Amino acid sequence: MTNFLFSLVSNLAFLAIVLSACHLCNRLVPGAELNGAHVFVALASAALLLDAALTFLVFADAQNRYGKFSSSSAFFERASAYVLAAIAALAWQYVLRRTRPAKTHKNTLVIRTSSYSESHLPM
């Protein structure tokens, strides 16, 4: 249980770092639209795949040296920590999207380009 809690806390700390880095990048780079939750989920998925490869391929060959890391129960503890952190990231994104007001473009020029579309040009 201690390993699960440590994995979960470290994944949540990594989530905070990724969200902060993406927010900072969105502020500093004009036109950047990085979604921190999606970046974190992609990184957590890659980490989960690498963890599975290490657990069942590398650590499985050295049972006497890495016995506690190569068990399937240890892998499922780490995998559930990855999944819970990814769920927390997506839930955080959902909550922020619901509470953030929609962007309104008050200074836009609307030009009807055809009978079924419009062009919105910022002023």
Image (tube, rainbow, N blue to C red):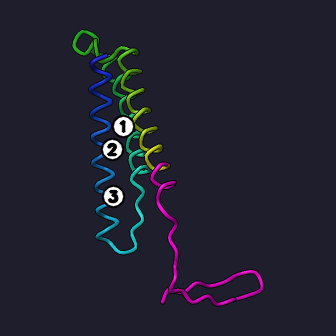
| The magenta segment | 95-123
N-term-proximal mark, 3 vs 1 = 3
* x, y percent for residue 41: 43, 44
Disc number placed over residue 47 in the picture, else none: 1
Does 55 appear above or below 32? above
- Residue corresponding to mark 3: 22
Does 81 appear above or below 32? above
Q: Residue at x 45, y 53 (%)?
A: 96
N-term-proximal mark, 3 vs 2 = 2
Q: Residue at x 28, y 56 (%)?
A: 21
| In the image, farthest residue toward the left | 65
Q: Secondary structure at mark 2?
A: helix
- Residue corresponding to mark 2: 15
Disc number placed over residue 100 in the picture, else none: none
Residue type at the position of mark 3 = Cys
Residue type at the position of mark 1 = Ala
Label 2–label 1 contact, CB within 8 A: no
